[in-house]
Amino acid sequence: MVVVPLTQGASAPGGATCEGEASSTNWIRYAAAGTLAASGVFLVTGQRRLGLVTALSGAALTLIDQQEVVRKCWDMLPELLEELQGMLGKAQTAVEDLSAQSEKLRKVLSQ
């Protein structure tokens, strides 16, 4: 009976497994998870500074483990910023229109 399913290492084209790479990634994941859990405990017990430092360490370990995801997000950043700039432009236009309408309403009500 297996309680925790064990994954097999990725196999190279020659049939050899890449166990070293898979196990190092798992250790980084375990360290990141443990560090983030410890930071939660520190924050709950009121040790804010230590909890913050521990959370930053856990986040750094997570970023090391998830390098491909970070690279994809970094590559998508310019598109996201352009979209956000467009949304801010629309919001600014809406606020200006609302301001103009409220000014007209004040003039009508003051007469």
Image: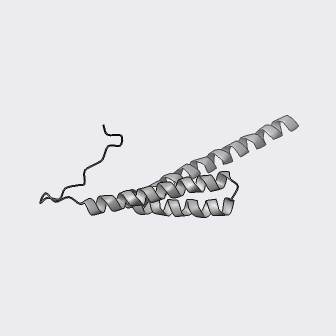
**Residue at the extreme front:** 1
Q: Is residue 37 left or right of residue 13?
A: right
Above or below, 68 against 8 in this view is below
Q: Nearer the viewer, residue 80 or 36?
A: 36
Q: Residue at x 23, y 55 (%)?
A: 10
**Residue at the extreme left:** 14
Q: Residue at x 68, y 59 (%)?
A: 48
- Is residue 70 in sight in this rendering? no
Residue 75 screen position, x and y as percent: 39, 60
Quarter of the figure that contains the C terminus: top right
Q: Nearer the viewer, residue 47 or 73?
A: 47
Residue 88 screen position, x and y as percent: 58, 52
Q: Quadrant of residue 100?
A: top right
Residue 85 screen position, x and y as percent: 53, 55
The colour scheme used to paint the residues is one colour
Residue 98 screen position, x and y as percent: 69, 42
Numbered label tally:
0
Quarter of the figure that contains the N terminus: top left
Q: Quadrant of residue 15?
A: bottom left
- Is residue 45 in sight in this rendering? yes
Q: Nearer the viewer, residue 47 or 88?
A: 47
Q: Is residue 44 left or right of residue 54?
A: right
Q: Residue at x 67, y 46 (%)?
A: 95
Q: Residue at x 41, y 60 (%)?
A: 28
